[in-house]
Image: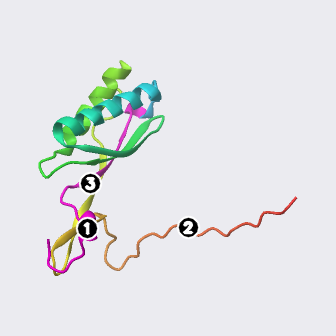
Amino acid sequence: MIKGRPHRLDRIYIDQPLFFVTFSTRNRRKIPSLDRANAALKEYGRRASETFNVGVGRYVIMPDHVHLFIRGDQSFVLSPWVGGLKRAVSVALRSPRLWQPGQGKEMLQPARLPPQGKEMLQPARLPPQGKEMLQPARLPLQKQEKN
C-alpha cells in the first residue's frame, strides 16, 4: 500500500488483463440453439473460474456471433481459451465447424499513473495523434404530447 493513499482506492487498481472478445459463426449462419449455447458458455465459464482462475464477465449471444469480457491472471493466454470455449459450445450444439476461425479481441489494458505507478483500466486503442475520439451522437429530445 502506498503511504497516504485512501484504502478505498485499492479496489480500482488491477494487475490482470481484461479482454473484450467477439467471435462469429462460419459464413454468419445462425447458432442452432441460443439456449444450449448459453448453457454451454455458463458451464465453461464456471469451470474456468473454479479450475483456472479465469473470469467470464458480461456477455451477449447474438444469432450469429458472441461478445464477452474475459479476465485472467498474467499467465492467461486468450486464443487457446477462446478455442476451447468455441469447441465446448459446438459440442453442446452438436454442430461441428460452427465457428469462423480466429476471434476479434480488444484488450483493456493498464495505464501507468505517475508518480505512484499503480494501474487503472483504460481502452488499449487510442486515436492517431491529432485525431479526436468519436463522441456519442447527441440526438435532440422529443417532447411527448399529453393525450
Quadrant that contains the C terminus: bottom right
Disc 1 packing (10 Å; few <14; some 14–19; many ≥20): some
Name the residue type under label 3. Leu
Nearest the viewer among 57 and 122 is 57
Q: Which residue type does callout 1 highlight?
A: Met
Check disc 2 and give the amino acid type: Ala
Q: Secondary structure at mark 1?
A: strand
Residue 125 image offset from top left, x and y in percent? 30, 64
Q: Is residue 138 above or below residue 22?
A: below
Residue under the point 20% across and 48% down: 72
Q: Residue 86 in the image: state x and y as whole percent.
A: 30, 32
- Find out whether residue 87 is within the magenta segment: no
Who comes first in sequence, dot 2 or dot 1? 1
User: Which residue is the site of mark 1?
Assistant: 120
Which stretch appears magenta? 1-27
Give the mark toward the camera: 2 or 1: 1
Quadrant of the rendered image containing residue 146: bottom right
Q: Residue 133 occupies which quadrant of the picture?
A: bottom left
Residue 137: image tag: 2
Which is more toward the observer, 32 or 45?
45
The residue at the point 76 percent across, 67 percent down is 143
Q: Which dot marks residue 143?
A: none
Whole-angstrom CA distance, mark 3 to mark 1, is 11 Å
Residue under label 3: 18
Residue 39 vertical position relative to residue 12 in the rendered view, above or below: above
Give the SS element for disc 2.
loop
Q: Is residue 22 magenta?
A: yes
Q: Quadrant of the N terminus?
A: bottom left
Residue 144 screen position, x and y as percent: 78, 63
Residue 33 placement (x, y as % from top left): 46, 25
Q: Which of the pair 104/120 is nearer the observer? A: 120
